Amino acid sequence: MEKETLSRLAALRAEMASRQIDAYIIPGTDPHQSEYYAAHWDFRTWISGFDGSAGTVVVTMQDAGLWTDSRYFLQAEEQLAGSGIKLFKEGLPDTPSYIEWLSTVLPPHSTVAIDGTLFPVTTVEAMQKTFAAQELQLDCNFTPFDRIWAQRPEIPLHPFFVHELKYSGEETASKVARTLELTRNAGAEALLLAALDEIAWLFNIRGSDVHCNPVAIAYAYIDAERRILFIDERKVDAAGKAYLHEEGIEYMPYSAVFDFAAHIHKNVLIDPSKTNYALASALNTGVIRAASPVAALKAIKNETQIKGVRHAMVRDGVALIRFFRWLDNNIDTGNVTEMSAAQQLRAFRAEQELFVDESFDTIAGFNEHGAIVHYTATPESDAKITRKGFLLVDSGAQYLDGTTDITRTFVVGSLTPKQKRDFTLVLKGHIALTMCRFPQGTRGAQLDAIAREPLWSERLSYLHGTGHGVGHFLNVHEGPQSIRLQENPVELAPGMITSCEPGLYRTGEYGIRHENLLLTVEDKETEFGKFYRFEPLTLFPFDKRALDISILLPHEIAWLNDYHRLVYDKLKSSLTSDECKWLLEATSAL
């Protein structure tokens, strides 16, 4: 890969020179601002070799850098070795942003270029403001990969399919009506959507265009009279045509959205953080900028969806029990590796009813690999699992009735007292956040420290967020809510599903993370207002063999016993007698 990266950088710089461009910014996304996207737009990986889900490459005529966050520091260091691209660690006090860096390395009147379809309006306008102050020019129409990437993959052509009412719980017409009401409340008459998961939710469609994310590549527009899906006609099969006709949804070519946007004559709402700059620039009408109303509606799961997720969690728990029993029974053969373990877990999930796919590629990190937050085993790194330490497994599935995401740190062999203490400190944080009650209006940033306090008290920490929203048979990472140190104005509300996943990572040694999905539910109304709480949805035990019981408080032991009792009661009727015996021991009271 080293030689390929260097030759690709040379080809890019030749294109830059031909256009008198001094720097080019390459994000890891697509025209829909997706976290995960089709290979057609994987420019950043092609040019750098780095394939994490977050990161931006910047190339000048002399230098190149990759900016990524703490989840990928170790992975990026390995993948960038010999590439000619330097790692910039985002989030650290001494790391400049890539915009700040360009402002210092480029002389005045230099030209910085981007592909305007790959950046949201908010980012481009921030660039324009900063660069103007530094007397730098911004070119938003540079698309060099059309010429230098000879075997660039095509946009996927998989037909979309309908997410049936028995799973979605709400008719498309109802969703459109509620969305338009919020759109009008914001002062607009129409809504233009680019986010793939929002389009999928609004029109009750799903697809297989993006790995592990059941979305179809498209744009959408709605107003009081029209509902339009901009999608490649080859992706609309007979069933799709019938469904769109029944729902009164027109369809037009995918690329026609730009010309259509130029001829909209109504005030149109766009979300500037999710709409690419090129599309927004095509609009010649009144524009209302606001958070997408679809995001807020989609975040609150209805009763059908919640019921579906509960059923999916039972099936997921069964698959996980079968996997961990298989793991424990096969380690001593010497044939179990990180990759084979991940493959076996997928196989057990695939046996379950309504399984469609994984919700992301399984992270199976043995000992020091567990310290790489978003580790992906490769044939070169694939470690053999032996009877020593931890195996961290972060995994999930897409079922027609719900999306799952769980992390368990599993004991595979002997542990040190430090490992047990670390394991228990992280679990204390998980329990504290799960148990908390909070008043209506609470934001995730106000709760994040609760999960970190047991670690902070020991001068330990982790750099990633504690929780993210989760879609319903949609993207495993979903907004608008989150639980993290950074401020997010979105309030947690009943019906939201959010992860709880504190962790601790000791580089070169091991990683620990405990993750459940939590449903926000109403708790009690008092003279001080309404209070909410979290209800665990995930059904699988924590590994008691790694506990340092001496540092657990009585209420923490009680919570763990209650949770384990819940897991056993929910799963026992779906298990064989031998599996029940395993689970009974795994969930026995402390």
Image (cartoon, rainbow, N blue to C red):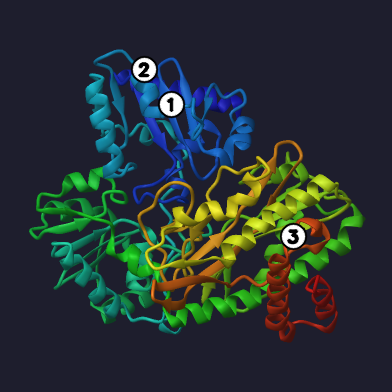
Residue 178, percent across and down? Answer: 25, 74
Q: Earlier in the sequence, mark 1 or mark 3?
A: 1
| Distance from the alpha carbon under mark 1 to that under mark 3 | 41 Å
Residue 212, percent across and down? Answer: 53, 59
Q: Is residue 70 above or below residue 317?
A: above
Q: Secondary structure at mark 1?
A: loop
Q: Earlier in the sequence, mark 2 or mark 3?
A: 2
Q: Which residue is mark 1?
A: 96
Packing grade of label 3 (10 A; few <14, some 14-19, many >=20) is some
229 sits to left or right of 24: left
Q: Which residue is mark 3?
A: 552
Residue 297 visible in the snapshot? yes
Residue 401, percent across and down? Answer: 52, 77
* Tags 2 and 1 touching, CB below 8 Å: yes
| Distance from the alpha carbon under mark 2 to that under mark 3 | 51 Å
Q: Which mark is residue 164?
A: none
Task: State which quadrant residue 228 falls in.
Answer: bottom left
Q: Which residue is mark 2?
A: 104
Spot the residue most to the top. 107
Residue 400, percent across and down? Answer: 52, 75
Q: Secondary structure at mark 2?
A: helix
